[in-house]
Amino acid sequence: MDTNDSLRVASLWHSMHAISQQLSPTTGCSEIELLEANTFDLHCFQSLTGSKFFVVCKLGTQHMEALLKVVYELYTDYVLKNPFYEMKMPIRCEVFDINLTQTVQKDRVALLGR
Amino acid sequence: MQFFGGSEISPSPPVPTATGNNAHMMYVFNRNGVCLLYREWNRPLHTLNPQQDHKLMFGLLFSLKSLTAKMDPTNAEKGNLGIPQLPGLGCSFHSFRTNTYKLSFMETPSGIKFILVTNPRTGDLRETLKYIYNLYVEYVAKNPLYTPGTLIRCELFNTALDQYVRSIA
């Protein structure tokens, strides 16, 4: 999926998020947390500032919310505290990528080891 | 997913998995976006008038299906966003959950879409929706007085549906 498609998907998600809040039968709806499809699950985490983090995983994977919170911490540490990072631009921080890969690897090992 | 075949006409209802309140509401759309049925059992908040609500719901599902087909990691050939997907083509989602509700979705090969909105702790409702589809087939599709593409006004269907949904919780 190239950058244009990612942008389209992101804007689509943002609008659907808003629509799903409108259609809620009760008050206090904040976000779509989980989307279950036939071949994958999509977990979403929204920070207090409105930044949305997604993870696409295999059906029935557990503890994705914890993973998303860890990714959010990494984001604040390596991206937001990076003086050369411009807000709203694509993230190109090597350290962030390395740590992200490491976290996902650790998660995968932990899951397979079970 | 098996829609045809099987010796039973109406399979036995699945074991109830939901806890807490009954279902909030239910929508049935046909392939053109016409809302064939809207049932409400528990909906404290109405944000929009019914027509807008139905259109918004249909649009949301259309976009979500398009997005899931695009984001499918197992499918190498991906269509463009915005192209209507035929029922059964591409990966489709079956439910999404927010912190206040869970929406379960099922599309039949004929393009009839069933949407059930319940409390967020509900389990997998795919079997439930299949059973509701069977109710639809029995009471609506086989009804000689019903014109396809119009609002469903079959009392028997409504009663059977209400009874069944009450038994889920």
Image (cartoon, grey):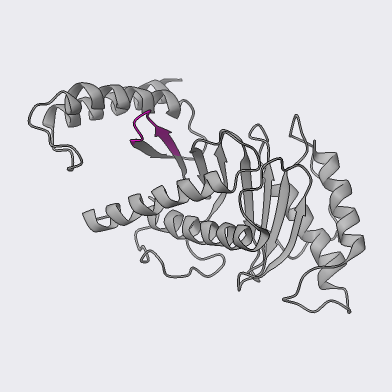
- The quadrant the C terminus of chain B occupies is top right
Q: Residue furthest left?
A: A84
Q: Nearer the viewer, residue A80 or A106?
A: A80
Q: Where's residue B65, x and y in %?
A: 49, 58
With A113 as the anchor, is B52 left or right in this view? right
**Residue A102 seen in the current view:** no
Horizontal side of B37 relative to B48 (left or right) equals: right
**Residue occupying the point 60% across, 43% down:** A24
Q: Quadrant of residue A111?
A: top left
Residue B61 lies, in percent from the top left, at 54, 57
In the image, is residue B44 above or below residue B87? above
Numbered-mark total: 0
Nearer the observer, B28 or B14? B28
When asked about the image quadrant of residue A66, the answer is top left
Residue at 22% from the left image edge and 54% from the top image edge? A3
Q: Quadrant of the N terminus of chain B?
A: bottom right
Q: Position of residue B166 (x, y in %)?
A: 85, 42
In the image, the segment drawn in magenta is A43-51
The spot of residue A56 in percent (x, y) is 40, 41
Relative to residue A110, is residue A60 drawn left or right? right
Q: Is residue B3 visible?
A: yes
Q: Residue at x 60, y 74 (%)?
A: B32
Asked if residue A47 lies in the magenta stretch, the reply is yes
Magenta highlight on residue A97: no
| In this rendering, position of residue B108 left or right of residue B156 | left
